[in-house]
Amino acid sequence: MTYETAKPKPKALLVGIIAPQTTDAENEESLAELGRLASTLGFAVVKSLSQRRRSLSGSSVVGQGKLKELARWTGGRGVVEKWSASKKGKVEDVEEDEEENEEDGEVVERVDAVIFDCELTPSQLGNLHSALAVEILDRTGVIVEIFSRHARTREAKLQVEIARLKYLAPRLRKSGSQSSERMNKAGETSLELDKRRIRDRISELKEEILAVQKDQSVGRSQRAEQRCVALVGYTNAGKSSLMRALTGSQVLVEDKLFATLETTVRTLVPETTPRILISDTVGFIRKLPHDLVASFRSTLEEAKNAWLLLYVVDASDPSFRSQLQVTKEVLSSLEIVDVPWRLVLNKCDRVEDPKALQREFPEAILLSAKEPAQVAGLRQRLIEFFEEGMSEEEVFIPYTAQQGVGRLRSLVTVVSERYSDEGTFYLVRGHNLEQLRAGLP
Ligand SMILES: Nc1nc2c(ncn2[C@@H]2O[C@H](COP(=O)(O)OP(=O)(O)OP(=O)(O)O)[C@@H](O)[C@H]2O)c(=O)[nH]1
Ligand SMILES: [Mg+2]
């Protein structure tokens, strides 16, 4: 959904902190992505600045000089103000820059927010806010906010609210005024009270999720033995577009990061017998916040139970190789391993030299979700995948147990039938026929 408004977009300045093991190119990629995340939230990015640092642990992450430079963009004082323990007055945090990077003479635009491409500790967030006097966000905060705006299903909303509360709880700050420190009857300050309310709310939400998941696991276990292909991959790779093209469904497709937050399952069309199910899943991103990864666990159950995973990649993105790596890492952290997979290099309509790409990834399926003929080719590959490893066998179903026929047809292809006095012999083609036989009357 896009809302056209006359209001000017708030302006944002991005800050990359380059850790010793990170290359400049990796930092540029990550910052470009942060820019897309920020614009998904509605910011106009006016500038990106970076600084190489030995660690992320400084009181304001960046050095003193850099902080002053940032303050030119925000109108803040550019110094971290701390109230000294002895209450003598404000003391300045003195932290030397490791690298000076002044850009003199540059036209400086006032920004409304500074967004850091790393996770800031609650105290760094507070210090930066005091030095820069504008809204301070970090990468995790931006992602959590996008998730909470895009969640649509009940479960996604609950999962994301937990992640958001967990992110916010330690970041609640004392407002500094006397009243906020006043204690309630139980001897809690209002800050402690807020934190307790958040903890209570999180337990409530967890209970609600359990109830929702119970309902869903029924549907999932019914689907578990059916042929299912899950589309997985980096955000914006084109998973939902492929889902639409393969199934004719109207799932949401948007040029936004994290357009899809929930798993949808639809039947491959034209329909096969037995049918093949396709599921669309949430996209991944580098530096994914831990709590959000945890919240994907159940959303991605569908992928775990799939017979085949399609790793969908935006081949027109120069950084698709590292995106593929991130996808593999997230899947293995979710213990989704041992599921057969194929690589789908999507958006090939935007790739200059598809032949070179095919040479680099000989096993990959190159296509564009926008080219129906190529999508039909993928459909054929899926059908072939299910054909491999199939065997044929005759199974008998007595007339007294006709309820078994529906299940049989949903799981295997019936090649031919012959009738006897007691029932029907079906010649079937499919996978795991012993298992199938065990389940029959
Ligand atoms: N040119 C081109 N654009 C594509 C292709 N496939 C998808 N897109 C565009 O890429 C953008 C993202 O597509 P989605 O299908 O929403 O991507 P997704 O992987 O579902 O993204 P998330 O739900 O955010 O994880 C949309 O603007 C699509 O129109 C393609 O083959 N070629
Ligand atoms: Mg999607």
Image (tube, rainbow, N blue to C red):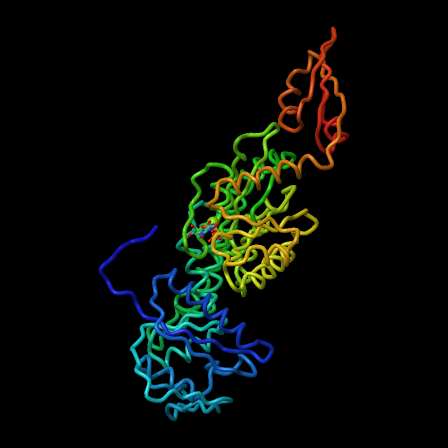
Q: How many marks?
A: 0
Residue 72 appears in which quarter of the rendering? bottom left
Outermost residue toward the top?
Answer: 421
Residue 184 appears in which quarter of the rendering? bottom left
Say which of 34 and 24 sits in front: 24
Outermost residue toward the left?
Answer: 6
Residue depicted at x 54% and y 35%: 268
* Picture layout, residue 395 above or below residue 387: above
Which corner quadrant holds the C terminus?
Answer: top right
Could you tell whether 350 is left or right of 345 in the image? left
Residue depicted at x 30% and y 68%: 10
Task: Give how far across and how far down residue 187 sits, in percent.
Answer: 43, 69
Task: Give how far across and how far down residue 25 sits, in percent.
Answer: 53, 74
Task: Give how far across and how far down residue 366 sits, in percent.
Answer: 57, 50
* Picture layout, residue 98 above or below residue 223: below
* Picture layout, residue 410 above or below residue 198: above
Residue depicted at x 44% and y 73%: 116
Q: Is residue 204 visible?
A: no
Q: Is residue 371 visible?
A: yes
* Picture layout, residue 82 above or below residue 302: below
Could you tell whether 331 is left or right of 253 in the image? right
Task: Give how far across and how far down residue 174 sits, in percent.
Answer: 39, 74
Say which of 5 and 93 sits in front: 5
Could you tell whether 201 is left or right of 106 in the image? right
Could you tell whether 431 is left or right of 246 in the image? right
Residue 181 appears in which quarter of the rendering? bottom left
Say which of 248 and 292 sits in front: 248
